[in-house]
Image (tube, rainbow, N blue to C red):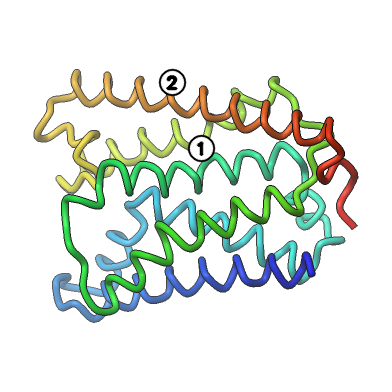
Amino acid sequence: MERSFRGLIALAAWSGLGIQLWILLTSGAFDTQALAVWRFLAFFTILTNLIVAIVSTASAIAPESAFGRFAGGANVRAAVLLYIAAVGIIYHLILAGLWDPQGWQRVADQLLHTATPILAALGWLLFDRKQGLTYAAIPVMLIFPAGYTLYALARGTFDGFYPYPFIDAGQLGYTRALINIAGLTGAFALGAGLVITLGRMLGSFGVRNSPAT
């Protein structure tokens, strides 16, 4: 049951990623396919869904491999949940009203921002072990989102494209963008603490409080 559910999460994530990449490659908006891939890799949504897809695939296919055991760690799972939950929450609270995707773009949009986050959250609640969750992991959990914002700013400086309006230094200026990034980092730290607290509470009630099998 657990491995099948991991496979379902992986299928949702890989499908959303594949459709979105296909849309960019066939859009005619880029001079080369390399530029389309470069744009594809600009988004936190894409990189986070890629993490979910890889971790879920490993857990479904080879949970006893070295990477499978690493990916099954309580703090790793909590970090992945934090990232993909942020994708869904930020999109639906801030970004969804900024556009109205149609056709295959809508399919990709729903897979990446809705289906995968919901499935990943359910997987965490039902199957991910909670034993070993520690608040000391919070700084490590912040490395990916903090690193992404620096990566996005560097890319924007290089090619002028900022994937999200709240980090668009071209429009906001670097001071405002950095203030927004500081706020986002604080929100991620708070979210990490909440995920760990919830996991420890669930673990105290015996909800998946043993190593994965």
Which quarter of the figure is the N terminus placed in? bottom right
Residue 149 occupies which quadrant of the picture? top left
Of label 1 and label 2, which has the lower sequence position?
Answer: 1
Residue 151, position as x, y percentages in the image: 36, 39
Disc 1 packing (10 Å; few <14; some 14–19; many ≥20): some
Residue 29, position as x, y percentages in the image: 14, 71
Mark 1 → mark 2, Cα distance in angstroms: 13 Å
Residue 195 occupies which quadrant of the picture? top right
Residue designated by label 1: 144
* Residue type indicated by callout 2: Gly
Name the residue located 22 percent from the left edge and 34 percent from the top edge: 166
Number of the label disc, if any, that sits on residue 152: none
Compared to residue 180, the image places residue 24 above or below, namely below
Residue nearest the observer in this picture, 47 or 132: 132
* Residue type indicated by callout 1: Phe
Residue designated by label 2: 186
